[in-house]
Image (tube, rainbow, N blue to C red):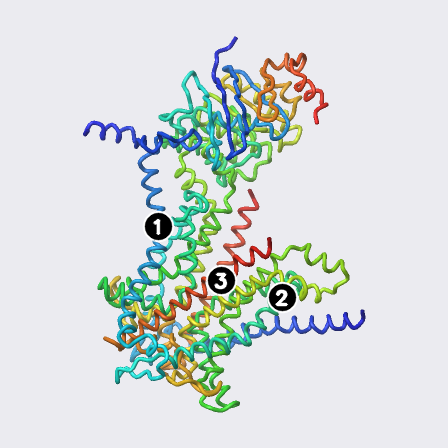
Amino acid sequence: MGKMIANGLTAGVVKVESEEKNRPHGQQRFRPLNIERGIEFLLKLSAAIAILAIILISIFIFARGIPLILKIGLIDFIFNLKWSPSHGSYGIAAMLVGSLVVTLSSLIWAVPLGISSAIFMAEIAPPRIGSMLGRMVELLAGIPSVVFGFFGLIVIVPFIRTHLGGNGMSVLAGAIILGIMILPTIISISRDSILTVPAEYKEGSLALGATHMQSIKGVILPAARSGIITAIILGMGRAIGETMAVVMVTGNSTIIPGSILSPVRTMTSNIVLEMGYASGDHQAALFATGAVLFIFIVILNLVVNISIKAGKNYAN
Amino acid sequence: MSQLKLKSENIKVFYKDFQALYDVNMDIEENRVTALIGPSGCGKSTFLRTINRLNELIEGTRTEGQIYLDEQPIYEKDRDVVELRKKVGMVFQKPSVFPMSIYENVAYGPRIHGIKDRKRLSEIVERSLKAANLWNEISDRLNSPAARLSGGQQQRLVIARVLAVEPEVILMDEPASALDPISTSRLEDLIVELKKKYTIVIVTHNMQQAARISDYTGFFLNGQLVEFSSTDELFVNPRDKRTEDYITGRFG
Amino acid sequence: MLTNNTGDKFIKVFFWLSGLIIVAILFIIIAYIIVKGISAISLDFIFEAPRRAGKEGGIWTTIVSTVYLTVVSLIIAVPVGVGSAIHLEEYAPRRSWFATLVNLTAETLAGIPSIVFGLFGFVFFVIFLQMGWSIISGSLTMALMILPTITRTAQEAILAVPAEYRENSLALGASKWQTISRVVLPSAVPGIITGIILAIGRAVGETAALILTAGSSLGMPEGLLDPARTMSVHLYILAMEGISMDRAFGTAFLIIVLIVVINYLANLSLRRMSYVNRQI
């Protein structure tokens, strides 16, 4: 036995007979070197790390958050308006509503502007201007959220305070900053999906006597629909998950906002504001909030995958 | 009569459900040029790629039958493909130089086969470039990127890269199809010169080329080897009607 | 017909306007921070350590922490991401369940909000593995966040390497790994570098996840187990707690300059990649 191993080593080979026996010629692998096998294994291992990470993230977030949800009840956790850790009351309804309100109000203006600039870049602008704009959008995407938050705090909040009233820290400030931040996502994905619409569609429509604008509305946008929906959903995901920019401009009161000028606290803000000093049930409640966010994002991802598949069917 | 170098026995190749080759039997002699001709998609390139087992790179390919190199079967469980491909070099249709210097391109093969000594590498590089008739043109710029060479030079560089591994057989898959007439004629001269040391199997769609440089010619059609004989005989006295149609240009 | 054309022209103006708004937004943000921030910049601001919680002094320790954290997370994420890309593009059979799963999880990973990464990093690295608030906890968390970017760009770069290179190398008797390590990867390097540059951009700007994993200590980190405060975290704390708006502007200025430079480099290496591939 020892001799066989020594032989195997000196020859630098591994025998893989059992696997090879029934293979036709086409799939035979002959005497792969030890080192090749080792590297192949390492590479597969690194690919597996992404899977491992997702599993660990789910396990650890849920393990820390779920017991508290079970203790106070899912209904109470989600629908109770009272968040008061010092009194042992952990309802995230106000923050849940806060996240949704800020996200939706950012979508209201960022989606139309994003899509129309995507159309502009893909269809109307001269190619040089289109690609220049594309690089600007990339740069916008690269600006860190804390810088957006800082800009909002210094420029937008005081502007709202002087011109619209209130103290400026508001749903509106959050909606403006978040909208700017999700514009790159909406624009680049919509633009890509418009660009992949086959040229024949447009030519066919133009040949029928439709104007350029009519062709955009009647042919190109419907064909790019699933990509645009994907863009909106991903933008929404980014808005719900955004933390630093929102926390810096929305005032962070745990109340359901009465108007766009009232302050608001989102789920993400709540986590970053209180993690520093939370412990026990309080900390568990923040993890439970993280779990809710996580589920939100996974669902949005699923919807995106379905929408992409639907788009492929549509294209076929 | 020269010695037998390669022998294929009932070679069949399948791509998933499609059968690309039907029972190809061929004897290839040492130090001779054997040309494979036939219309596109006839299986001549597929056959060429069975000789160094390169078809296996394509998922879903299956090969049956046997090829013997120096009477040793190559489709065999214990056969080392790396060893096989060292002995059987290949030149492709499109000259594909690696994005490195001329020197590094030629030294690539010897290096992967374990030669590290710089002096020996330089010797091999020089000898191979000389054998490929490229040395005189580029000996002063061995360290410049290979991509800057002309198409004809690139193809000769690729041949030098193959020669550096010291193969016994060289497979060529339409090596002149991307070249201009002058480069093509230089390549043909080179092939005739190389056969003194190597056994050459060349796929070509250019019948004049096959007639000019080869000793034996095989005509493929629809995955079958229709006719295989000495080049003179095949072009002057084809036995099969289909061969005659093809070489006289009356084919489809 | 005439009305159609005037309608078209009107709509066209509207589209031009929306493009213009995007330019204006970007311009205003960058210009504002640069104009307001430049006066805070001096050699002392950059090279002096902060004093009195950042109220005085410079931001040197946060610059060092940012570089430290970024480098360590790249050291972790680049081999894993590139290795994963090699496996997916060169080894895994198309449509195998494993490859599908890896691609799907990488996508999901890319969508997870940084605050959730922060929570995970906190409970897993900081608490469970007892690494505490430290460079290593922050870097490991950061590595997971940039992993999808590195994997995806490396995948694209490997995919763009011409198949003939592989055929030629294998036909010369090279083994699969020799072919990958000596021909495929060197050709894919510009693309891989683009991914790394994008990841650096993300690491420089990250805040939420790092507050929860690397802490916010202003000291100079001396080892992997020391806590650290990056420039972005520093900016957040300076601005939110109103410690020093002047220094917040200066920090924001440096971050913006960094991001613009990184963006420029990414574009440069992208163009170089398409140039290399055109040469072939």
Q: In the rendering, at what x and y percent does residue C200 appear? A: 41, 61
The amino acid pointed to by label 1 is Ser
Q: Report the number of discs.
A: 3
Q: Chain of mark 2?
A: A
The residue beneath circle 1 is A46
Q: In the rendering, at what x and y percent does residue C133 appear? A: 26, 68
Looking at the image, is A242 positioned above or below residue B241?
below
Are dots 1 and 3 on a single chain?
Answer: yes
What secondary structure is found at the residue carrying circle 1? helix
Looking at the image, is A106 positioned above or below residue B60?
below
Q: Quadrant of residue A62?
A: bottom left
Is there a contact, CB below 8 Å, between mark 3 and mark 2? no
The numbered mark at residue A119 is 2
The residue sitting at the right extreme is C2
The residue sitting at the top extreme is B1
Q: In the rendering, at what x and y percent does residue B229 appear? A: 59, 14
Q: Quadrant of residue C173?
A: top left
Q: Earlier in the sequence, mark 2 or mark 1?
A: 1
The amino acid pointed to by label 2 is Ile
Q: Quadrant of residue C11?
A: bottom right
The residue beneath circle 3 is A304
**Neighbours of disc 3 within 10 Å: few (<14), some (14-19), many (20+):** many
**Neighbours of disc 1 within 10 Å: few (<14), some (14-19), many (20+):** many
What secondary structure is found at the residue carrying circle 3? helix
Q: Chain of mark 1?
A: A
What secondary structure is found at the residue carrying circle 2? helix
Left or right: B70 as drawn, with respect to A76 = right
Q: Quick one: B101 or A30, which is closer to the camera?
A: A30
Are dots 2 and 1 on a single chain?
Answer: yes
The amino acid pointed to by label 3 is Val
